[in-house]
Amino acid sequence: MDEFNRILIVDDERQNIKILTEFLRDDYKIMAAKDGETAITALTKSTLPDLILLDIMMPGINGYEVIKQLKSNERTREIPVIFITALDATDDESLGFEMGAVDYITKPFKPVIVKARLKTHLQLKQKTDLLDRLASFDGLTQIPNRRNFDMVLEKEIGKTLRNGSLLSLLLMDIDHFKKFNDNYGHIEGDACLKKVALALKEVISRPGDFVARYGGEEFAMILPETDLKGAIHIARQAQQSVQRLCIPHATSKVSKYLSISIGVATKLSGKKDNPIELTQKADTALYQAKANGRNCVVSASQ
């Protein structure tokens, strides 16, 4: 098991934390919280653990309330939780499983059993994380895929409707990519897509900014809290980042090097654009960029 896996122990009894730490610290990085309130606060500020050992019976917020809050928070809902309890009633176990716990360990602790259960659930989490990544990331470029893009765009538009904030979307297309493939071959074409993906990733810097492979030779960029002027500026940076790659494109009609065309659309505060409408605006702008001769940026009419 990865020695860097983090385990958060939440228990109001210091002796329980001490016992668990003693036989787990050689294999895991141990974090501890003396009560539910402390645990919830820590989880909003610090590096997330890979698994939580959570006592049920604690003063203040008990284990059931803690797991309820964890599962309602997008940041923490996927962390496996194993309940610590001296209880052996079936009803208590059933309630814990219904609330999202993956297992129980009982006091007094049996090190062999505790270690085995931690190992099992951490391995399951690693496999689940891998499957989630495979489902959400493009296998070639290793950036988010169209499925991931659709989910993020819907979430970000939901935020704008609640907060009245701005949101910009860029749709990008590699100019004359079919000609590039025909001339240089699909192996070079794949290498080109990887380089472009990396170049676009280098353009975004804020935590909320998002770039994805939209399909084929198309890429997309979601820019929360960004007005049209800011989005056009980032689009220009994206163009320059790709141009700096200096990938020869002898069959291009617009440049001797690989270039991209970009359509920009901005959702203004107060407007109730849905994901489809905003995407259509960006797509129309991209179509116009191609009609204008490619290797340019065009913004949608508001």
Image (cartoon, helix red, strand yellow):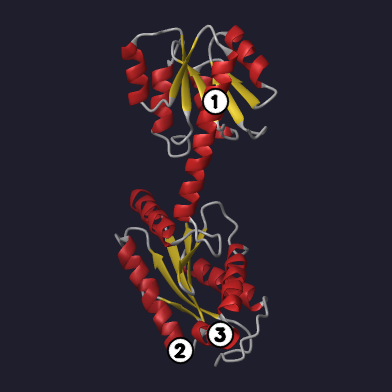
**Horizontal side of residue 92 vs 70, given as left or right:** left
Q: Percent x, y for residue 69?
A: 41, 28
Q: Percent x, y for residue 233?
A: 55, 71
Please name the amino acid that badge 2 sits on.
Answer: Asn
Which one is nearer the viewer's eye here, 230 or 123?
Answer: 123
**Residue at 48%, 33% in the rendered image:** 79
**Residue at 31%, 62% in the rendered image:** 273
66, above or below 189, in the image = above
Which one is nearer the viewer's eye here, 149 or 93?
Answer: 93
Query: Depth-wise, is mark 3 or mark 1 nearer the camera?
Result: 1
**Residue 295 shows in the view:** no
Query: Depth-wise, is mark 1 or mark 2 nearer the camera?
Result: 1
Q: Which residue is mark 3?
A: 180
Sequence-earlier tag: 1 or 2:
1
Sequence-earlier tag: 3 or 1:
1
Asked whether disc 3 touches disc 2, contact meaning CB atoms under 8 Å apart, the reply is no
- Gap in Å between the C-alphas at discs 3 and 1? 51 Å
* Outermost residue toward the right in this view: 26
Q: Percent x, y for residue 240?
A: 62, 76
Please name the amino acid that badge 1 sits on.
Answer: Leu
- Gap in Å between the C-alphas at discs 1 and 2? 59 Å
Q: Which residue is mark 1?
A: 118
Mark 1: few/some/many CA within 10 Å (<14, 14-19, 20+): many
Q: Which residue is mark 2?
A: 292
Quadrant, the C terminus: bottom left
**Residue 155 shows in the view:** yes
